[in-house]
Image (cartoon, grey):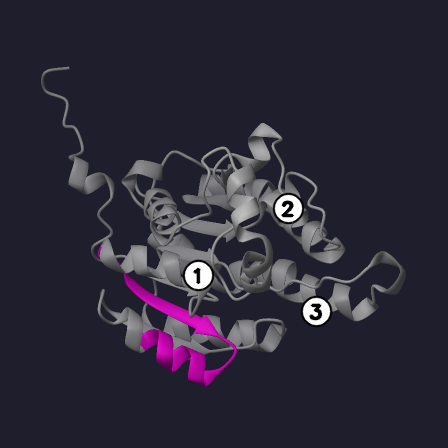
Amino acid sequence: MADKQFTTHRELFDLSGKYALVTGGTKGIGMMMARGLLQAGARVVISSRTADACAKAQRLLSEFGDVRAIPADLSRRDECVRLADLVKADSECLDILVNNAGAMWREPLATFPDEGWDAVIDLNLKAPFRLVQALLPALRTAGTADDPARIINIGSIAAIHVAQAPNYSYAGSKAALHQLTRVLARELGPQHITVNAVAPGVFPSQMMASTLDAIGDTIAAATPLRRIGRDDDMAGIAVFLAGRAGAYLTGAIIPVDGGIATTASGTP
């Protein structure tokens, strides 16, 4: 043991020289994760549907490091391929892919439309798969046995426990994404690529804004840690999974939710 070389604390979480793509990185959880990766030293590309959102987020995140924003509608296959091509044109290696872009559709069972399935499945489930397909050569080039490339899928605790909101397609898409994470982890592990999913609980975001305005205090009170998520909670898990500290973890679904899903305390 005396001659064993141990990784330093700093090196466990250092992402200097790494290249990352964070979809849906202009707001909410995606922006939290992008900020964490930038602060750890990575060069980050973020994407969003609108050019205005991309420009604003790039300005805000540039304080933390080297960031580039690319508008792309990832509900469409051709746009997934276009984004992947632009990322690969900048570097033959992609060290970190964060599949965060997502949509939610709430409507009662009796009136829930086909559109509520198509829009959500296209973005929440098909887009991550399409991006993995398109970016696989760059991920393979980046990964090594000691330092695999990383795919981080953003699932949800709605796929672990049953929320009261009528979010049929959202919960279904995230449960499918969790299983897709496990399937890809088994296939891509031998290719030096890890695949894990983060299942966030309640965090401040545009998607959750109306819910938090209405019952945010009640949700916090029902959470074992008695609060909703903070920016650092998402930044931290992203850096852990992307860095040396998370290099031996694959096929995991990690709830970052203050204990809601794993203790069956539920949310109102």
Task: Point out the image quarter for the N terminus.
Answer: top left
Task: Choose top left, top right, bottom left or bottom right for residue 91.
Answer: bottom left
Q: Which residue is mark 1?
A: 30
- Looking at the rendered structure, which numbered label has been put on residue 119? 3
Q: Label 2: few (<14), some or many (≥20) within 10 Å?
A: many
The answer to whether residue 190 is above or below residue 37 is above
Residue 154 rendering spot, x and y as whole percentages: 52, 52
Q: Residue at x 18, y 41 (%)?
A: 11
Measure how far apart labels 2 and 3 are at the Cα level.
18 Å
Magenta range: 41-58
Residue 216: % across, % down: 54, 52
Q: CA distance from mark 2 to mark 1?
A: 18 Å
* Residue kind at label 1, given as amino acid type: Gly
Q: Which type of secondary structure does the marked residue at label 1 adopt?
A: helix
| Amino acid type shown at disc 3 | Ala
Please state which of the two labelled residues, at mark 2 or mark 3, is closer to the viewer. Answer: 2
Could you tell me which secondary element the residue under label 2 belongs to?
Answer: helix
Inter-mark Cα distance, 1 to 3: 19 Å
Q: Kindly identify which residue carries mark 2.
A: 158
What percent of the width, then of the height, locates residue 261? 59, 36
